[in-house]
Image (spheres, coloured by chain):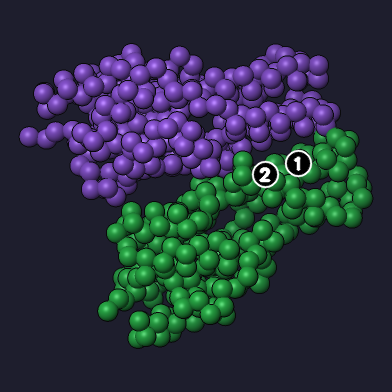
Chain colours: A purple, B green
């Protein structure tokens, strides 16, 4: 009989707030550009730039800042004042110092599972920023491993599992992104648990794999221990 | 008797060209700003910005691009034209696609050591960009492990060694940066081998630890196999 050995957690918007700080920065972007460009579709233009640049910039705040600057130049045909670009740079730097607000149940859940399971944090974004947030979260010591990756694909999960000698069907990944935390883990042979976040980034949207035998959804992290107990009983 | 078990390599300017592409981009920056700011100290202002921003941005091209934009705004008191900012963004993106030019002896040396030693690549910079370069180098499969880190400190090397079950005094790190590739590895109990690069970044400069028993310097990577043989005989 197989049992669960390893619980992996996503970080941003699973353990702590993230997207809301991006949204506040985006609002600042829209305000700053309001006097210089038509407001229509400004947010969509920014999202287009992010989507276009992901392949080169990867995830994280530095790429987001560069995409804000690029969009400001494009929508104003390069006429955006230097002061506005300076404000965008400052907004990006501020985003890099946002406080680490743990989500409800995050600390209790992780603390309760530590020692009983191998815990691995798997997150994407800028290295230094993710390290800062993990340090600020106070949860760092509860994890047996931390993987900061450039993309969350089936191959990446497989490498993480095999590198740690973990059989995929004994591993569970818990996160708010169906696209990054659930679907590729199911494909890699593991369990995928979706914990929807209140605010989600459009680029992370994907259909739920309803009916998949290793897919589960919970409303909050505090439901995770019961889910693990149920899954373990039925494996 | 202890023998060497593990050879770790730095990547940028140790295995492949890197700094020369930054320099070309910096020259482009100086040209672009020439009509808009006094040329005096422009390069120093850029270096100041990089130094100031390292803590937040970390290493890599995205942070460098943001520092170029910040410097352009500062030296022109925000009067730099939008076209110039757009050019700096484009220069940063171009830097993210620069070809991977292996340095002389890199491929033969790594290939000759693979299988005989555990080989680990240890590099800092933007995750996605370092992965792109490793893939483009064709050397990826020769390494037993790849560590992309935000900073190369004694603690980081210790974590890498202990995470892989490597006794520090059986590990050798080879790289072009005295500050990042040699000194902290010596502090961590390993061997540090300096291979000076033709062009070096000012922020990586440090004094050679002359007389340290585990410090060595070679003129080119092709000298590494002989050095390893000598060290192994004398341990």
Say which residue label 1 marks. Answer: B69
- Residue A212 visible in image: no
Which residue corresponds to the image point at 55% horizontal and 51% vertical from the top-left? B125
Q: Position of residue A92 (x, y in %)?
A: 65, 31
The answer to whether mark 2 and mark 1 are in CB contact below 8 A is no
Query: Label 2, label 1: how many angstroms apart (C-alpha)?
Result: 12 Å
- On-image quarter of the N terminus of chain B: bottom left
Which residue corresponds to the image point at 69% horizontal and 22% vertical from the top-left? A29
Which class describes the residues within 10 Å of circle 2: few (<14), some (14-19), or many (20+)?
A: some
Mark 2: secondary structure: helix
Q: Position of residue B15 (x, y in %)?
A: 52, 67
Say which residue label 2 marks. Answer: B53
Which residue corresponds to the image point at 89% horizontal and 55% vertical from the top-left? B40
Instruction: Please determine if labels 2 and 1 lie on a single subunit.
Output: yes
Position of A52 relative to B230 (above/below): above
Residue A192 is labelled as none
Position of A157 relative to A225 (above/below): below
Mark 1: secondary structure: helix
Read off the chain for label 2.
B
Q: Position of residue A230 (x, y in %)?
A: 16, 20
Which class describes the residues within 10 Å of circle 1: few (<14), some (14-19), or many (20+)?
A: many
Of residues B185 and B83, the one nearer the viewer is: B185
Position of A216 relative to B81 (above/below): above
Q: Position of residue A215 (x, y in %)?
A: 26, 23
- Residue B27 visible in image: yes
- On-image quarter of the C terminus of chain B: bottom left
Q: Quadrant of residue B169?
A: bottom left
Read off the chain for label 1.
B
Q: Specify which label sits upstream in the sequence, 2 or 1.
A: 2
Front label number (2 vs 1): 2
Q: Quadrant of residue A76?
A: top right
Of residues A21 and B152, the one nearer the viewer is: B152
């Amino acid at each position: 009989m197989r049992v669960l050995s390893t619980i992996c957690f996503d970080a941003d918007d699973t353990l702590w707030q993230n997207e809301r700080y991006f949204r506040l920065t985006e609002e600042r972007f829209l305000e700053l550009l309001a006097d210089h460009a038509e407001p229509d579709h400004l947010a969509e233009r920014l999202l287009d730039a992010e989507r276009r640049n992901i392949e080169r910039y990867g995830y994280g705040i530095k790429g987001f800042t560069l995409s804000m600057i690029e969009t400001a130049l494009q929508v104003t045909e390069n006429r955006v004042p230097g002061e506005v670009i300076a404000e965008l740079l400052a907004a990006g730097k501020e985003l890099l110092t946002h406080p680490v607000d743990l989500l409800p149940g995050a600390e209790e859940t992780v603390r309760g599972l530590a020692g009983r399971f191998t815990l691995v944090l798997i997150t994407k974004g800028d290295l230094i920023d993710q390290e800062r947030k993990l340090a600020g979260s106070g949860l760092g010591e509860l994890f047996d491993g931390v993987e900061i990756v450039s993309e969350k694909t089936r191959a990446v999960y497989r490498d993480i599992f095999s590198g740690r000698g973990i059989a995929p069907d004994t591993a569970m990944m818990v996160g708010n992104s169906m696209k990054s935390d659930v679907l590729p883990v199911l494909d890699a042979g593991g369990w995928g648990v979706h914990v929807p976040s209140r605010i989600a980034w459009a680029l992370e949207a994907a259909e739920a794999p309803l009916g998949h035998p290793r897919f589960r959804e919970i409303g909050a992290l505090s439901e995770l221990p019961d889910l693990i107990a149920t899954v373990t009983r039925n494996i």
